[in-house]
Every structure is written in structure tokens, then in C-alpha cells.
Image (cartoon, rainbow, N blue to C red):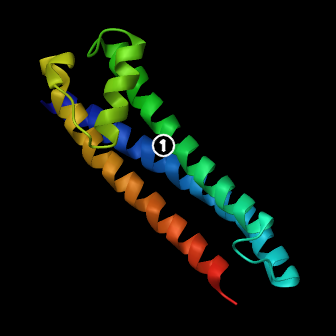
Amino acid sequence: MFGELTLATFMVLLTVIVHAIGLYAVARLLRLEEREEAAAHIHPLSARGFATTLIVILSLMALHGIEIWLYAFLYAGIGAVDGLRDAVYFSTITYGAIGYDDNAMAEQWRLVSAIEGINGVLMIGWSTAFFVMVVARMRRK
């Protein structure tokens, strides 16, 4: 159990760092957009506003994808799930807290996948807060 918790803690720290760096990069990109928005009075429903929203959404999806793949590589690497395809599938539905028959996961590593579910919910919540902040900023006059 100590090994599982240690590995899960490492993965949580890694995904939080990846997410923080990714959100920081997107925020830096949006600061440029914010300056242009203030100068040109860009409407959120304009092509520019739509493009900004799309960039944010795709960036958030990419961040979550990276984090899911990190867990998938871990599961495949330690032999907790057979094959990379099944590891990616298992990681995706675990990260999104959708649920899966955990018979696919080796019993000695199930605690890691349970913590991935909690981690994924927190990362998705963090992304949602970021997205709401961006949309709220765009709605300002």
C-alpha cells in the first residue's frame, strides 16, 4: 500500500505541475489577447472572440490529454493494465471519473487509479474555473 500511495502522490504532483505550467502558458497567451481586446473592443461572439474561446478549450483538452497519457504510460509501464490502448482507455475514464470495471487494473495498483479519479476531478474543476474566468473577462465591456 505504501508503494501505491507513493506512486499516486508522485503522479498527482506531476499532473499538478503540468497543469499549472499549461494554464500559465495559456494565461500568458491570453494577456496578449486581453491587450488587443481592450484596444479593439473585441466582442465575445466575434470571430476573434470565438477563436480565443476555441484556443482555450483546445489547450485545456490538450492539458488533460497529456495528464491522461502520463497515467496511461505509468499503468502500461508497471504492468497494471495490459497494453497501451487499454491503459489509455482506462486512464481516460478514470481521470474523468466516469468509472470502469476495475478488473482491468491489477489489484495491487487499484489505489493509484482511485487517486487518479480524484486527481482528474480536481484538474477538470481547475480548468473549468479557468475557462469561466476567461469567458467572464470576455463579457466585460
**Which residue is at the front of the view, 92 or 67?**
92
* Residue at x 36% of width, y 20% of height: 87
| Residue 130 on image: x %, y % | 52, 66
Give left or right: position of 32 versus 85: right
Residue at the right extreme, as displayed: 40
Q: Is residue 93 above or below residue 132?
A: above
Q: Is residue 21 above or below residue 28?
A: above
Q: Quadrant of residue 15?
A: top left
Secondary structure at numbered mark 1 = helix
| Residue 63 on image: x %, y % | 54, 44
* Residue at x 34% of width, y 46% of height: 120
Mark 1 Cα-neighbour bin, 10 Å: few <14, some 14–19, many ≥20 = many
User: Which residue has dot 1 on it?
Assistant: 64
**Which residue is at the front of the view, 110 or 134?**
134
Tell me the quadrant of the picture where the C terminus can be found: bottom right
Give left or right: position of 80 versus 133: left
* Residue at x 26% of width, y 48% of height: 118
